[in-house]
Image: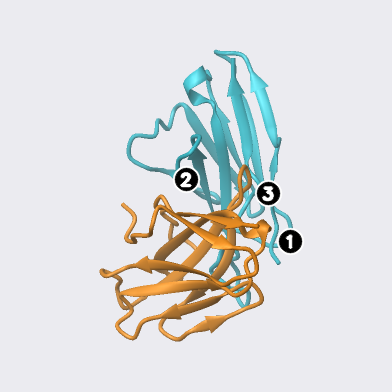
Chain colours: A cyan, B orange
Amino acid sequence: GAVVSQHPSWVICKSGTSVKIECRSLDFQATTMFWYRQFPKQSLMLMATSNEGSKATYEQGVEKDKFLINHASLTLSTLTVTSAHPEDSSFYICSASISGAGKLTYEQYFGPGTRLTVT
Amino acid sequence: DAKTTQPTSMDCAEGRAANLPCNHSTISGNEYVYWYRQIHSQGPQYIIHGLKNNETNEMASLIITEDRKSSTLILPHATLRDTAVYYCIVRPKTSYDKVIFGPGTSLSVIP
């Protein structure tokens, strides 16, 4: 099946620094990727839709200047948390769907997640 | 907002069938029913999806009522590894439509 990877799997950073999280589709191309955030004992909350070659679409209440998304290729999207603070500590998950003629399955494939801790 | 309602939690004895219900009374004609699950501290895993016919794969069966207003995910022989949060989602079958998660059902498989 389709595989989505994330790097790093966990990261600890100091307050005020920035951290970049990568999301890769390993064996398929993805025109659209999604970024989610999940706090302990809560469900996944969609943050933004990442579109290859264009600007990301952010959900209401998500600061686009704080959570920078870049989707430079059909297999890579990055989320940069700028000037991180302890309240940004969370589990960040990306997902992607297979795109391309003849390969449309429509299921969302999710990455394993990245645990961010801001101290 | 999520378009589905699910019980908050359920228990199931190991080896027995786990039946997870989902209500989606406002489902549109072009929307499919998808099921995902999330094991603790992992990314969600796709299980199965369907439009109106019952579906079965190696993981589970999906039973959708004739009026499509509810469905049931069936894990035929639950194991301890099936302990997870199960999410029922309705969405159009396109690659660009976002998946909105509700709170899901926390399934505990008990030895």
**Residue A7 located left or right of residue A71:** right
- Provide the chain ID for the residue under circle 1: A
Q: Which residue is mark 3?
A: A24
Q: Position of residue A72 (x, y in %)?
A: 61, 45
Closer mark to the observer between disc 2 and disc 3? 2
Kind of residue indicated by mark 2: Leu
Q: Which residue is mark 2?
A: A44
The residue at the point 73 percent across, 61 percent down is: A27
Q: Is residue B82 above or below residue B72?
A: above
> Between marks 2 and 1, how big is the CA–CA gap?
25 Å
Q: Which residue is mark 1?
A: A27
- Provide the chain ID for the residue under circle 3: A
Q: Nearer the viewer, residue A49 or A45?
A: A45
Closer mark to the observer between disc 2 and disc 1? 2
Residue at the right extreme, as displayed: A27
> Between marks 2 and 3, how big is the CA–CA gap?
19 Å
Q: Position of residue B29 (x, y in %)?
A: 31, 78
